[in-house]
Amino acid sequence: MKPQFGKHIAQHFLFDEGWTNMNHGSFGAVPRQVWERLRACQQMVEATPDKFVRYDYNAELIVSRKAIAKLVQAPLDTIVLVPNATTGIDTVLRNLSYSSSDHIIVFDTVYGACERTIHHLIETTEVQLTRIPLVYPIEDDQLLTAFRQTVQGIQARGKTARVAVFDIISFQPGVRTPFEALVMACRELEVLSCVDGAHCIGQLPLDLGALNPDFFVGNLHKWLFVPRGCAILYAPIRSQPLLRTTFPTSWGFTPRHGARCNSYFRQGPGWQSPFEVLFESFGTMDYSPFLCIRDALEFRASIGGEKAIMRHNAELAAVGGQTMAQMLETEVLDNCHRTLTRGCSMVNVRLPLPRSLAGGDETPRIVEWISHQLVEKYRTYAPVYEHNGQIWVRVSAQIYLELEDFRYLARALGQLCDILQRGKQPQSADLDIKSPASLIDGLSQDGISVLCQNGHSSLEY
């Protein structure tokens, strides 16, 4: 029997009544039974701190690593846990050595936190950054050609393309990349591949053994229902010698020069590799989310399993996105071959705003105003952003949502865009998000009437 998803599933989560969660992609959501496991783990630590930390934790950690290694089809000794994908990317990039001829390659849709790691490396090492511009919609072949030409151009100048960092699904726009072909191109061009799978696990099927990148990082707290923060760092045996330390450096680090360090209580079994031991501990922190992976997978299995969840979310994103685009009289962001949205649980819809509003100096403030209004007036949120001179919204489908939720968001955005266009082009003073009502000063009564009393919208259903 086909699993039944929709509004009734929301009872398994902890959302406030009246909150419509259209941004699962940023922070995920935790089912109640997984939340209970999280609290139970925290209780075990508090009940017998030394017993749990010194004797019980590592066995529990191995159970979690085995569960996620099976899901992503990778050997256990290639999978360790880190707090989030940003930490994982940061760990990989800071462990590599660089010379003045080395380049780190990214697309200009790279996640901002990861790009900041690279800029800090530029300040502290001799490495250089090469950004490949992307203007969506773009075909996969065009993206791959741009990547190859960039690498070959670096090599033709006698320089080294040291490592390429690229997404499986980028964050803004939230679109799928030809990551499999990019990994193959890196291997062919002798460039280390560092795959940012922050949005992958739980959204798309993943076979790391077949993909075989040099490094992969993926969040589990976004799409897999694991509590925040929890992510995997995958490094095949060939890549593990490059990862000398965690950040911060902690008990698992072994100095090459044989220096004697103060001892620590060895938590893990003797059969673990140096790579596994290295990532046992980052110092004192709450490791409870790491111990909830099996419970999250059990919940997913109980409601239909991975394939059913992914199929539902991809179908809802596709239909929901097209519905929003029709209501707003705009479009979904995709290319001719529909590869940007293939299998994805996120969809990007253009907002009906002219380029005079979408591409000007006030665009960041307009984006902030729309975002603030969604939260305060409509009790929902979806990331609003500018790309290629247009303003878009990235919407996440999930098992607790229905098509009506997409309609609700479209009506909200339509009303907000209508306010922005009525009467006059807003000035800087009108866009103060601390006083959003100022934006409608001087507009017609019709424009004001779209907002109802008590901060509630006429969109409620």
Image (spheres, rainbow, N blue to C red):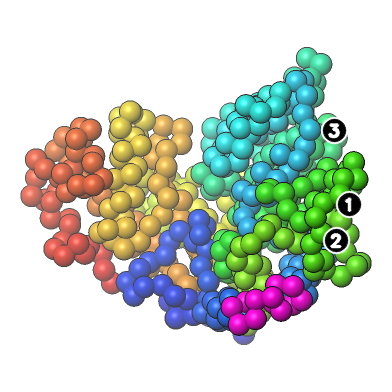
Q: Give me the residue at 75% from left, 20% from top.
A: 100
Residue 407, given in percent of the width and then of the height, sits at 36, 62
- How crowded is the residue under tag 3: few (<14 C-alpha within 10 Å), some, or many (20+)? some
Q: Earlier in the sequence, mark 1 or mark 3?
A: 3
Q: Give me the residue at 76% from left, 56% from top.
A: 251
Q: Mark 1 near mark 3, Cβ–Cβ under 8 Å? A: no
Which residue is label 1 attached to? 237
Which residue is label 2 attached to? 77
Q: Secondary structure at mark 1?
A: loop
Q: Give me the residue at 9% from left, 45% from top.
A: 444
Q: Which residues are magenta?
A: 45-56
Q: Amino acid at mark 3?
A: Glu
Q: Secondary structure at mark 2?
A: helix
Q: Secondary structure at mark 3?
A: loop
- How crowded is the residue under tag 1: few (<14 C-alpha within 10 Å), some, or many (20+)? some
2 vs 3, front mark: 2
Left/right of residue 403 with respect to residue 283 in the rendered view: left
Q: Amino acid at mark 2?
A: Asp
Left/right of residue 438 with respect to residue 350 in the rendered view: left
Given residues 63 and 308, the one toward you in this image is 63
Within the image, what quadrant is residue 425 found in? top left
Q: Earlier in the sequence, mark 2 or mark 3?
A: 2
Which residue is label 3 attached to? 190
